[in-house]
Image (cartoon, rainbow, N blue to C red):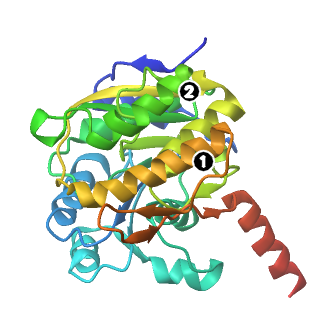
Amino acid sequence: MNGVQTFRASSVEAIRRAKLAAPGPSGAPLTVSVCIPCKNEAETIGDLVTTIRASLMGDDGLVDELVVIDDRSVDDTARLAREAGADVVHIEDVHESYGIGRGKGNVLWASLLASHGDLVVWLDGDLTTFEPSWVAGLVEPLVAHDDIALVKAASERPDDEGGGGRTTELVARPLMSLYLPALTDLRQPLAGEYAVRRTVVETLPFVTGWGVEMALLIDIANTCGPDAIAQVDVGVRRHRHQSLTSLSVQAAEVMATVLGRVGAGHQVATTFRRSDGVEVALNLDERPPVAEVVRGASAAGRTA
C-alpha cells in the first residue's frame, strides 16, 4: 500500500465484540482508554463524559478507562467532568513529576502517562456534536489491523465553520500537497478526534503546541509508513468557533512544525508577528517519547 487507508465503520456492537475477542500486546485482553484534553470546557464536558459512560463503558464495554486532563481550567471543567464520572487528572500533577510544559500537545503527552489502555482515543473537549459510534469507528481499524498505528476521524465540517476547517484548508492541506503527498487523502489531518496504538506513539516525541497532530502524522508515516495511518467517516462534527486572531498563532505553529520536519531549507522562526506589530512566541517545544520517560523513572526508582 502507498497511502492513507479509508474505512467504513461497523456497528458499535460488532466493534465491541471484536475488541473483547482481541488480545493486547502482552496477551492479556485488549484495553481502550478515552482521553479528553480540556481547558475551560465547562459548557460541553459534562454531557460528553456522560454520553461516553452511558453508551460505551460498563461490564464488557468497548471503553475501559475515561480520563480528562484538565489544563489549568479556571471554570468548572474539572468538577463537572468528575461528577459525570471521568477520572480527572490535573496537568500540574503531571508537571510535578515530569517538568512543566504548555500547549495541547503537552496535554496529549500527559494523557499517555495518566492512562493505561493499549489503544488511546483522543477527543476534543469542546465538541457540541458527538456520537458514541465515533469512538467505535476510530478503534475498529486498530483492532482489526495490527499494522495500523493511527486512525483519524474524517468528518464533515459545515460551511459556517470553515468547511474542512480554516487552518486545515489554508495551511495543513497546501503543505501536505507540497511536501507530504502520501498523506493528502486525509480529509481532516488536524482533527482532535483520533485513535492511536500506544506501543507506537510512546516511542515518538511530542510537539507540545498546536503542531502536535501534524508531527504525529509525519513521524508515524516516516517510522511505520503512510499505510499505517487510516481514517474513518464519523459524519458531521461541530465545535466552538475560534477567531482568526487565535487561529493565526495555531496556523503558524502548524506551519513551523511541518517545515521543521520536512527540511524546507532554512531555520524556522520561533516567533509570529501579528499585523499590529505584536510578536507572539510560538510553542515549538517537544516532550521526549513517553517510553523513554517511563524507563528513566523506573531506573531512578530502582537506584533510589
Q: Position of residue 178 (x, y in %)?
A: 52, 25
Q: Is residue 31 above or below residue 50?
A: above
Q: Which residue is mark 1?
A: 198
Task: Say if residue 144 shows up in the picture.
Answer: no
Q: Position of residue 284 (x, y in %)?
A: 56, 61
Which of discs 1 and 2 lies nearer the camera? The answer is 2
Quarter containing the N terminus: top right
Residue for point 20% across, 57% down: 243
Alpha carbon separation for disc pair 1 and 2 = 24 Å
Q: In front here: 303 or 161?
A: 161
Q: Position of residue 204 (x, y in %)?
A: 67, 50
Residue for point 12% across, 33% down: 159
Q: Which residue is mark 2?
A: 180
Residue for point 55% across, 74% down: 101
| Residue 8, label in figure | none
Mark 2 element type:
loop
Residue 53 placement: quadrant: bottom left
Q: In front here: 10 or 258?
A: 258
Task: Please state if 153 lies on the left or on the right of 180 as rendered.
Answer: left
